[in-house]
Amino acid sequence: MSNSWTTRAEIDADITAIHEVNSAAFDTEEEANLVDALRADPNWIPELSIVAVDAAGIVIGYALLTRCHVGDTAALCLGPCAVLPQYQRTGAGSAAIHAGLDRARERGEKYVVVLGHPSYYPRFGFGRASEHGIRLSVEVPDDALMALSLDGSPLPGGQVRYAAPFGI
């Protein structure tokens, strides 16, 4: 599989394709529908919803950053990231995440949290959130909640408050 893709912010014409990517990548339709719910939430930041597109302009991957808070401090949450099965393990997902994090830095955002697989997200600079006093209102494995400072400033402590569609 060729690694020829580009990344960009999603556009309205991508909505159906993004849903198809999520439906193909996630186990349940509830997980696939989360992106649609986040897009309707007031915390959604359109320019931080990134698609990876192949040479023909077909959406093959997706990553989303949305507003959350760590304690009283505004932060971002790296939300659903998905890639069509035939493009998984080709770097398309990583490219979309890197593009989203770069765009967040350009916007002056400082912090990002992610609840995800502990062997995947450290490659982007994420570390254990608990080491900085960051926690959730629900029990998760200690290494599953990770945090990243985009500008090198100390991470804030406190409980993460996600956008409502996350249900946490």
Image (spheres, helix red, strand yellow):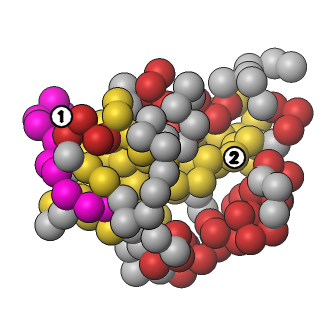
Image quadrant containing the N terminus: top right
Tell me which corner region of the image, top left, top right, bottom left or bottom right, holds residue 55.
top right
Residue that mark 2 sits on: 82
On the image, which quarter does residue 76 sit in? Answer: bottom left
The spot of residue 56 in percent (x, y) is: 81, 39
Question: Dot 1 lies on which element?
Answer: loop
Q: Report whether 127 appears left or right of 51.
A: left
Whichever of callouts 1 and 2 sits on the residue coming sooner in the sequence is: 2
Q: Which residues are magenta?
A: 150-160
Residue 75, image x, y percentages: 26, 56
**Which residue is the extreme one toward the left?**
153
Amino acid at circle 1? Asp
Tell me the residue at 60%/77% (across/down): 37
- Does residue 102 lie above or below 70 as drawn? above
Say which residue label 1 marks.
Answer: 151
Residue 77 appears at what percent x and percent y?
40, 55
Calculate the distance from the C-alpha at mark 1 to the C-alpha at mark 2: 26 Å
Mark 2 is on which residue type? Answer: Ala
Q: Viewer-proximal residue, 20 or 107?
A: 20
Q: Is residue 127 left or right of residue 133?
A: right
Disc 2 crowd rating (10 Å Cα; few below 14, some 14-19, many 20+) is many
Q: Residue at x 20, y 46 (%)?
A: 133
